[in-house]
């Protein structure tokens, strides 16, 4: 995340602060849910006797890549998108005032 955008959002006002805090809470909750589901899947994959070891390694490697994308990048991108929209709305509102 861009720290300058976060600093501007925090100093922009109450709505931006609430959005930022709620976004961080949702991101943390999302990360916990994905981590729990991932751990369950990993344990089931390791216990599966029918899968070969090579298949387990490939499957778990792909899982790690997907989880990193889902946990790190998606919530961050959505939060940045919301903060940018709030900043644009604030900018338009200030331009329309005489």
Image (spheres, helix red, strand yellow):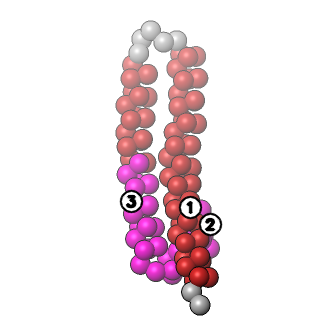
Please indicate, yes or no, whether residue 50 appears anywhere in the rendered image.
yes
Label at residue 2: 2
**Which residue is under mark 3?**
25
Q: Is residue 61 above or below residue 85?
A: above
Please, what secondary structure does the residue beneath circle 2 have? Answer: loop
Which residue is at 56% across, 59% downward? 81
**Label 3, label 2: how far apart the Cα atoms are:** 18 Å
Mark 3 or mark 1, whichever is nearer to me? 1
Residue 54: percent from the left, percent from the top? 58, 16
Dots 3, 1 in contact, CB < 8 A: no
Q: Is residue 8 visible?
A: no
Picture disc at residue 71: none
Magenta-colored stretch includes residue 90: no
Q: Residues within 10 Å of mark 2 (few under 14, many from 20)?
A: few
Q: Residues within 10 Å of mark 1 (few under 14, many from 20)?
A: some
- Name above or below for residue 34 compared with residue 6: above
Instruction: Look at the image and give the residue range highlighted in magenta.
Output: 1-30
Mark 1 — residue? 80
Q: Residue 41 in the image: state x and y as whole percent.
A: 41, 28
Sequence-wise, which precedes: disc 1 or disc 2?
2
- Residue 2 drawn above or below residue 95: above
1 and 2 marks in contact (CB < 8 Å): yes
The local secondary structure at tag 3 comes to helix
Characterize the local packing of mark 3: few (<14), some (14-19) or many (20 or more) Cα atoms within 10 angstroms: few
Residue 10 lies in the magenta-colored region: yes
Q: Residue at x 51, y 81 (%)?
A: 11
């Amino acid at each position: 995340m861009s720290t300058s955008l976060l600093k501007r959002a925090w100093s922009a006002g109450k709505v931006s602060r609430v959005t930022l805090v709620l976004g961080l809470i949702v991101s943390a909750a999302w990360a916990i849910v994905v981590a729990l589901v991932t751990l369950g899947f990993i344990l089931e994959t390791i216990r599966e006797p029918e899968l070969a070891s090579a298949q387990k390694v490939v499957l778990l490697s792909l899982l790690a890549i997907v989880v990193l994308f889902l946990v790190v990048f998606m919530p961050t991108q959505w939060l940045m998108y919301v903060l940018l929209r709030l900043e644009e709305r604030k900018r338009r509102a200030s331009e329309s005032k005489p």
